[in-house]
Image (tube, rainbow, N blue to C red):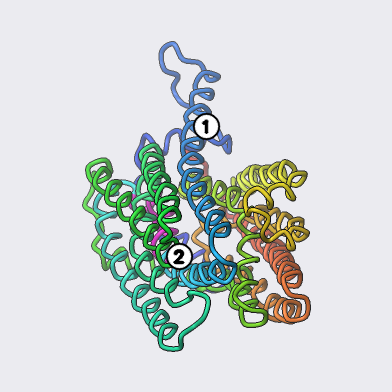
Amino acid sequence: MDGAREVAAIAQNQEPMSTMPEQQSVGVVENFGVERQSEPAESGSTPEGSRFQNLLRWATKGGLAIVDQGLISGANFLLGILLARWLAPDQYGAYALAFSAFLLLSFLYYPLLLEPMAVFSGSAYSRCLRGYLKSLVWIHVAITVVTVVVLGAAAFVAFYRSAPGGLPGALLGVTIASPCILLFWLARRAYYMELAPARAATGALLYCVLVVSGTYFLFRVGRLSPFTAYVLMATGALTTGLYLMFHIRNRLPALEAGPTPRETWTRHWSYGRWALAAAIATWIPYYMYYPLVTSFFGMAQAGQLRALMNFALPMEQTFTALSCLFLPYAARIQAQQGRRSAGLLTRRITAIYVVGAIAYWLVFMPFKAQAFHFLYAGKYTEVAYLIPYVALETILWSASFGPAIVLRAMESSISIFYARCVASVLSLAVGIPLTHAYGLWGAMVGIVLANAAALVVTLYILRSKIAEGRPVSAVQPETA
């Protein structure tokens, strides 16, 4: 899948519009205002009333998705804040370093399972979601085994070398937690296949209660550490994941026989191999700085970096929740209309993310000093001056969400890979020397430059693909 010809080949392999469930294909375009198609008016209904109902339905689902992700974000945000407050800086640095290692391996999971799941559940497998989920469980098991083996080996090496700052225990804890967290991710995403985030929000509430109350209990009994924090996350994720999987079994439609695990894996690999490369390229400009500052300046510096980035978590997790809805929706738009609506859809999604990011930081900025004192009990105030850099890099990051979602809906993961490669090369060439010379300030400048480069390249590629699609759409007759 390199270049425009490979993207065109992928588009030709998509399922035709007739495979979409009729109730989804009739009205889904109206929900976001991309294109309205005439429909027979129901008795007593008006076009204005229908548009209002569609808008209300979309707003309700979007609100539930935000609640779902908000609860998860709130739990993880509180966990990060409480650990930063109650652990020594080097222990918190060990927690952050172990988490960055988990994220690197989770990038195997997201592009090969969760991202294709969001795309194909709205297009190719929309009529056999129950069987599709069964095949996804087998892929989940295989990826989980790889993750546990790699993290377990890292924990063994850390124990053998007697790494300082609680790093061996943190790596062992994240090894235990990783399969449970991945199951939780799969279970929550299963509800988004039907654009039904209500039950996922219920599971998120359960996870939030378990993690937050468990953290406080461990602190009160004097057992809080990076290891026990990860074991607590494992307990909450496993309990909630099993609860969600139990209730999803009979909810998904089974109008057709589902794909086999081999067929599912083949299709996911065809889509996700470049998404996997893009995910690894994504880790470099954003998460390489945790091991980098640890090697240059010590474990406590990784804790400071994590303490800074904690303030962006609520916004980032909210945007991730919205992408869970926008990606399947954009995939359906592509299956129905091709690329002729991509420009308008991109502008609207991008506007939501950018306006949201700017509003978030405008509210936060006047109180940043108070936030450090209140949340961290006076710790980490020496890096509070870097918050504007965090704000700038997250605004640039949010601006790339719209074009990236549309490119993924086009099944053009290679485009994301190209953009992230540019960001990675820039980080390696500029970010490493800046970090070595200027510490955390250099790391933040490197992240800002990487986000800016990724945004510019992503927009350029998307515009090129929209331009490629215009002549094709112009000669094809429009469907009624």
Vertically, is 254 above or below 13? above
Residue at horizontal 65 percent and vertical 76 percent from the top: 293
Residue 47 percent across, percent down from the top left:
53, 20
Q: Which residue is mark 1?
A: 59
The answer to which of 421 and 376 lies nearer the viewer is 376
Residue at horizontal 45 percent and vertical 42 percent from the top: 68
Is there CB contact under 8 Å for labels 1 and 2?
no
Q: Which residue is mark 2?
A: 225
Q: Which residues are magenta?
A: 112-125
115 part of magenta stretch: yes
Disc number placed over residue 458 in the picture, else none? none
182 part of magenta stretch: no
Q: State the predominant SS element of the stretch in magenta.
A: helix
Chain-order first, disc 1 or disc 2: 1
Give the amino acid at mark 2. Ser
Judged from the image, the secondary structure of the residue bearing numbered disc 1 is: helix
Residue at horizontal 26 percent and vertical 64 percent from the top: 138
Q: Residue furthest front?
A: 221
Residue 252 percent across, percent down from the top left:
28, 43
Report how far apart the C-alphas of labels 1 and 2 lie in the structure.
41 Å
